[in-house]
Image: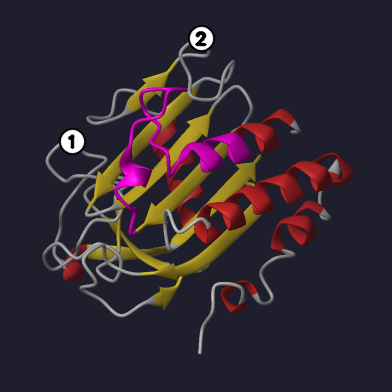
Amino acid sequence: MFTRRAVLTGLSGLALSACAHRSGADALRIPAASARRRIEDLVYSAMVPAAGLVVRYRDEVVFAHTEGLAQGAAGEADRAPFTPETAFCAAALSPLAAAPHDPRFAPRGPAATLYTREDEGLWQVQTEAGECAGASFLGLASLARAAGRTSDLPGVQTYQADTSPIPGVKLIGHQGEAYGSYSAAFHAPDLEAEIAFAVTGTSVSGTERSVHHPVMIKATEPLWAAAETLLAAL
């Protein structure tokens, strides 16, 4: 039987073990612990049943932490562990099309979108399951790096340093929503870094807009804050 804490068995040390393979690991130790606590507290607050964050730096994962059990917002699918290896489906319209899907978390047709709405541009593509190429939750950040190199993609969201959800950090990517699932993948070109996060089954209170930035909702505030702390330590 899965429990929220059991989901993280063998995973809670992933961020630190990943950091150990690069210089400056000690600088990330405290920010990583803080980020994990933010994610855990978010899930234990019952605002969302599952949440996760991945941070990459110079093509290497330096933080990956997930918490909880994911399920469609209306209970359409069986609950499943939300892990860094969660299977997604990346739409293959072009090498730069970053549109992960997972029918377990946000049922919406043959290949339901967890990531974004499909009618807003290339970043949000609805596609048949047979037309997809597999990716993992860890792969979201990698997709953001590829897509972020072309800032004029349809659907792309670009935040300059002075208007960014992470103050002082330019971001290129997308945040989207479908059926109570909110996720984002952004490239930070000046830092050579990427972030990707997701929450699923968001409660009504969690969907309230944040006072901190228009792109944020209450449920994603802790993930943005965790990402900010980690990027500041790079």
Q: Residue furthest bottom?
A: 1
Give the residue at mark 2: 162
Contact, mark 1 vs mark 2 (Cβ under 8 Å): no
Find numbered disc 1 in the image and state the secondary structure of the residue it sits on: loop
Front-lying residue, 96 or 12 = 12
Give the residue at mark 1: 121
Q: Is residue 149 left or right of residue 42?
A: left
Compared to residue 79, the image places residue 216 above or below, namely: above
Compared to residue 218, the image places residue 43 above or below, namely: below
Magenta: main secondary structure equals: loop
Locate residue 151: give its quadrant. Answer: top left
Residue 55 in the image: x percent, y percent? 60, 45
Residues drawn in magenta: 201-227
Q: Residue at x 29, y 49 (%)?
A: 99
Q: Residue at x 57, y 18 (%)?
A: 167
Residue 137 lies in the magenta stretch: no
Residue 134 in the image: x percent, y percent? 36, 66
Residue 211 lies in the magenta stretch: yes
Q: Residue at x 45, y 41 (%)?
A: 220
Q: Is residue 18 left or right of residue 86?
A: right
Q: Amino acid at mark 2?
A: Asp
Q: In this rendering, does residue 62 appear at all?
A: no
Compared to residue 138, the image places residue 166 above or below, namely: above
Find numbered disc 2 in the image and state the secondary structure of the residue it sits on: loop
Q: Quadrant of the C terminus?
A: top right
Residue 40 in the image: x percent, y percent? 60, 57
Q: Amino acid at mark 1?
A: Gly
Q: Residue at x 69, y 75 (%)?
A: 10
Front-lying residue, 231 or 37 = 37
Q: Is residue 34 left or right of residue 101?
A: right
